[in-house]
Image: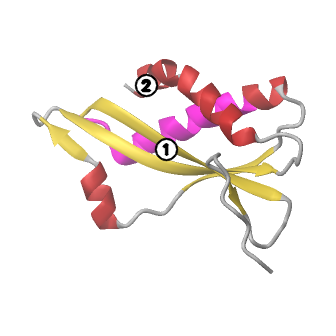
Amino acid sequence: MAPASPTKYPTISLEDEDGQEIVPIQFVANGISDNASRNEIKSEMVSSLRRILLQLSEDIEELKVTNVQERAVSARRRRILLTNHRGLEKNYEIVFDVFVVRNDEVNFAPIIIEALQSSYDEIISQIQ
């Protein structure tokens, strides 16, 4: 069996063919107060992500989100992604995997990414 050719959308098909796709979402938050812990930031990001996905799934009947989880990142990579600026602010980058039920007629990755991009300022204001 020949391997499937890559798509132009950032969607990962699960190999076990359980009817799901993974949409990777990269959250970048710049200028966050140095007083906030990574767990607090992550919690706010997950909360915002779930709220936006819930609203999106209410608007798009075919969209069924089954799970949202943080993608594992090595401790070394995490240190690179978490940088201090002037000792007062931090920049965070966390990657989440959004699991959606596959629909052969709709590619949800661009829809999810567009919804998050349009809500970015709102998300950052909640985190700060």
The one of 7 and 120 positioned closer to us in this rendering: 7
Vertical relation: 13 (above or below) 109: below
The one of 117 and 72 positioned closer to us in this rendering: 117
Report the amino acid beneath label 2: Ile
Q: Report the residue at 89% width, 36% height from top.
A: 62
The numbered mark at residue 26 is 1
Quarter of the image with the N terminus is: bottom right
Provide the residue designation for mark 2.
Answer: 124
Residue 73 position, x and y percent, is: 42, 62
- Extreme left residue here? 86
Residue 57 position, x and y percent, is: 80, 32
Please state the total of marks drawn on the protein image. Answer: 2
Which type of secondary structure does the marked residue at label 2 adopt? helix
| Direction from residue 27 to residue 1 in the image, left or right | right
Sequence order check, earlier mark of 2 and 1: 1
* 41 magenta-colored: yes
Which type of secondary structure does the marked residue at label 1 adopt? strand
Report the amino acid beneath label 1: Gln
Q: Report the residue at 83% width, 68% height from top.
A: 17
Q: Report the residue at 15% width, 32% height from top.
A: 88
Quarter of the image with the C terminus is: top left
Quadrant in which residue 75 is drawn: bottom left
- Magenta span of residues: 34-54
Residue count near mark 2 (Cα–Cα under 10 Å), binned few <14, some 14–19, many ≥20: some
Residue 41 position, x and y percent, is: 41, 39
* 59 magenta-colored: no
Quadrant in which residue 21 is drawn: bottom right
Vertical relation: 72 (above or below) 92: below
Q: Report the residue at 49% width, 50% height from top.
A: 95
The one of 34 and 102 positioned closer to us in this rendering: 102
Circle nearer the viewer, 2 or 1: 1
